[in-house]
Amino acid sequence: MSFTEQIMPIFRVTLEVLREAGGAVPPGVVRDAVIERVAIPRDLQSPDAHGEIRWWTEVGFRTGEAASLGWMAKRNGWSITSDGIKALEDFPGDVICQELRRQYHNRRLFRAGEFPSAFEQYQRNLGYARQLVHGGRNLERLGVGAFDVTDLYRAAWTQAVAALDHWVTQEIIDRAVALAQRPEVPRPNNFSKLSMPVELVEKVHRNGEPLDEAFRAALEGFFEYKTFQHPDKIAEGFSHVSKIKLWKSVADKLTDQDPSMPIAADEIRAQLTEIARRRNNIAHTADHDPDSFRRKKKITAREAEQTIDVLESVVIAILQALGDLPPATDPSIPPAEVGSLGRLRSWLMRNAGV
């Protein structure tokens, strides 16, 4: 039996546990309930290359995908939505996993080849951050004193913010490339502010290089020295590929996930600003405590863990707020209605710095 086939019944039981709970449940409680209900194959109980239990790591990925589709939420714990309950009813047995993958692949933006989606890589990076927290907790229990164990929590905090920064960059680039391949789709005004080098026009128009490859390379250069950690910078970045009022839309999505704890756009911005500020303090001053030059600011495993959870739920809400683009066209074949390159070539020429 393949790895995917082994995970299918585990994922279904995870959703069933959430359905029966009827509200938000801590992930650890979900994990224990799943273990009681389904036999976990022995090979999935072993640690992966990063020290994480294989089946639980995979459940984390699959539930992240489910949350991005609106089947469940990961705010203040895990919970299932009405769409998730309907999916359980409509897709019996392991079919629900197949449907999850079908919808996720149809709605997400994937790079060619073996590259994971931006969101998949984000989940993996957050997994590394959680692993640092887990390791720190274990060392604290053992009373390790050879070094400051709490530095692992600082490293996890920094890793989580770096994961957010990387995801935002890749998501913007993926969406910009997708928009470039869809000349018929209305673009945000800021899309035209993505200045492209003349070399890009040459590669696409004269040398026949695939648009997606040439445009992606140019965008990676455009965003190479930009960072997306502060909420205002994140909103500015996504304004190149979306017309939505980002933080208002994200606040609405998060509130829908847990109406008992509504949240406003300003609260989200304040949370992210403080998370970025603490990361900068860790990175640039070794987390110096301004009240005492002899010590670092205090940090706990729970604080680091909560930061990771907040960043995960915010990114899921951003994905839901941004929505999906129309199906992709073949990047190697210009749309018939625009001739050889038509409006797309005109756009490239206007934004090639000439």
Image: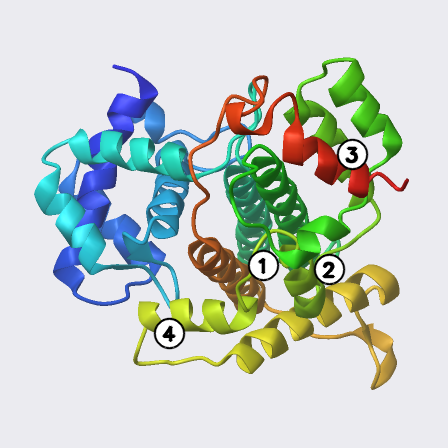
- Whole-number angstrom distance, CA of label 2 to CA of label 1: 10 Å
Q: Are marks 3 and 1 in contact (CB under 8 Å)?
A: no
| Left or right of 147 in this view: 71 | left
Residue at the image position 33 percent from the left and 46 percent from the top:
66
Residue at the image position 33 percent from the left and 21 percent from the top:
3
The three-letter amino acid code for the residue at tag 3 is: Ala
Quarter of the image with the C terminus in it: top right
Where is residue 148 shown, x and y percent of the image?
73, 60
Mark 2 — residue?
148
- Residue 127, placed above or below residue 264: above
Q: Are marks 4 and 2 in contact (CB under 8 Å)?
A: no
Q: Looking at the rendered structure, which numbered label has been put on residue 255?
A: 4
Q: Looking at the rendered structure, which numbered label has been put on residue 140?
A: 1
| SS type, badge 4 | helix
Mark 4 vs mark 2: give the one in front: 4
The three-letter amino acid code for the residue at tag 4 is: Thr
- Whole-number angstrom distance, CA of label 3 to CA of label 4: 37 Å
Mark 3 — residue?
218
